[in-house]
Amino acid sequence: MFDTKKVREDFPILSRKVNGQTLVYLDNAATSQKPIQVIDAISQYYKEYNANIHRGLHTLSEEATIAYEDVREKIAKFIGARETNSVIFTRNTTEAINLVAHSWGRHNILPGDQIVLSAMEHHSNLVPWQMLAKDRQANLAFIELTADGQLDMESAKKVIGSPRTKLVCINHMSNALGTINPVAEIAKLARSQGATVLIDAAQSVPHLPTSVQEIDCDFLAFSFHKMLGPTGVGVLWGKPELLEAMPPFLGGGDMISAVWRDRATYNELPWKFEAGTPNIADVIASGVAIDYLQNLGMENVRAHEIELTEYALKKFTTLNDVVIYGPPNAKDRGGVISFNFAQVHPHDLGQILNESGIAIRAGHHCCQPLMRDLNVSGTARASFYIYNTKEEVDLLMAALEEANKVMGHVAFR
Amino acid sequence: MSLSDDLYRETILDHYHHPRNQGVIEHPTVKVEGVNPLCGDEVTLYINVNNKTIDDVKIHGKGCSINTASGSIMSDLIKGKSVEEASKTIELFKSMMLTKGVEVEIPEELEDLECLQGVKKYPVRIKCALLPWNTLAEGLKTAETKAGQFVHFETNGDHELGRVVVNGG
Ligand SMILES: Cc1ncc(COP(=O)(O)O)c(C=O)c1O
């Protein structure tokens, strides 16, 4: 296990004050904070070897190209991918999913085909499929949830079992409920129907050891800004044979091999899908984020979050009038606690907690259909990462007590 | 005084805990449902208009304290007023909430609006306070043109995002 105190020293932002109080950052499911090593890597690139990649013959360009491509290799290892060329850089998870919807979807989904999602998908893993389904006259079908916010596997078998199922798109860990989904099992079900499987790993790759081979999926998408890296870098991993067969997504420089006035041939993988100058500085800094996580060890990251989540769940049960969404056992969930408290509207809660320097998220968490199913307008959500502590959980509890006072309820025992 | 004491003044909390004119009207002149899809706040207004006067208003909503209090205060202020007076009050309230920097002068008979000035310090919450008023404006417009008995519209506070009119004429 790592020393959280030491980890905290690497995060300059954690010593800032908000409304006169030391920041307690519990909005990690939205985006994580960045260690100084990542921040420094960005300025080091601009100070020492800023150049465009894949084209210059000069030293700076060579250095930048090597640094950029090295990250691809690190990512492949980090997610257990066999081939480095199956890692494609995008802006974020959303763009990675849209890439698949356009490039794979528009060539493989036929009228009447079924695309299977779950009732807890982020809008990022829902709206692109709505658009595709409309475009291709295909249908969406949903795996329903159990009362404690897990995938209902009976429903999964039934829905995926339809002979029209062509694609199954599921999140590995829910940003709204914290639920960790049995994606390997889902992928197996899908495979037995000959369907393709995409995993939205935006919440899992940052928090759990994740292996594309163990899951046995076809595509996997995630974002670096949720895992200590900068904004503006996402990854699409895909099985090389699928990626090979897919047409390019965007056209332009870098993705071509040879160009004539009226036509072009395309570059090989992975560059076929990386048109234009990429986000070089932030990709390089993302490599440093991976180094940081690997130093801690993903098993340890997971253990730390289970410990914190268990502690927080226990503390929450001492509150009256609190509803916690998602699985009751910390081992079935990531470090995300979605809740409603004392009938205080989540926006009121978020604002009052902010006065104690505590940052939580309040709202629909980009999961409006799920909120509708839960019959709430939104929830408050505290989400943890490597630098969070039990003391911070205690501060959260104290601030909830304060919020309750401000709003004039008496909900504490 | 902490920031939250400032925002959650007594008047706001009073209206939040005991919202006025709650309920439904069976056959209203117009029923308007206003939704802010981004934060999930919802307000339904039932309005009876007779001889250009708002005879009765009922409100039914799901939202945060600011939204609920704003709607409650509004319903108190416009009940029994002429459509023209109500429209002026809407304009006044919107200018109070949307004018940056300066405090807008509020006439004595509308002093209940005063407590909502504090919301201006929290730009993300302004839309919560505005939703009932935008919904009312929509309702009065519809009642006047007899365009429909039921309107559903979506707004982010500044801009309309979508609308459905049922029984439109
Ligand atoms: C489960 C899940 N999927 C997708 C996304 C979208 O990620 P991004 O905004 O980086 O594209 C998020 C982030 O909020 C998420 O939590």
Image (cartoon, rainbow, N blue to C red):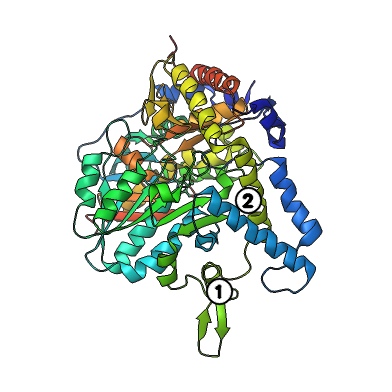
* Circle 1 SS class: loop
Q: Please state which of residues A374 and A198 is positioned toward the viewer in this rendering.
A: A198
Kindly tell me whether residue B147 is visible in this rendering: no
Q: CA distance from mark 2 to mark 1?
A: 22 Å
Q: Residues within 10 Å of mark 2 (few under 14, many from 20)?
A: many
Placement of A312 over or under B96, stated as above or below = above
Q: Please state which of residues A393 and A88 is positioned toward the viewer in this rendering.
A: A88
Same chain for mark 2 and mark 1? The answer is: yes
Quarter of the image where the C terminus of chain A is located? top left
Residue at far right of view: A48
Disc 2 residue type (three-letter)? Ser
Kindly identify which residue carries mark 1. Answer: A255
Count of marks placed on residues: 2
Decide which of tag 2 and tag 1 comes sooner along the chain. Answer: 1
**Relative image position of residue A343 (x, y in whole percent):** 40, 24
Residue at far top of view: A413
Kindly tell me whether residue B79 is visible in this rendering: yes
Disc 1 residue type (three-letter)? Met
Kindly identify which residue carries mark 2. Answer: A286
**Relative image position of residue A347 (x, y in whole percent):** 48, 33
Pinpoint the chain carrying mark 1: A
- For the point 72% across and 63% down, the residue is A64
- Residue A178 lies left or right of residue A118; in this view the side is right
**Relative image position of residue A113 (x, y in whole percent):** 24, 63
Q: Residues within 10 Å of mark 1 (few under 14, many from 20)?
A: many
Quarter of the image where the N terminus of chain A is located? top right
- For the point 41% across and 68% down, the residue is A103
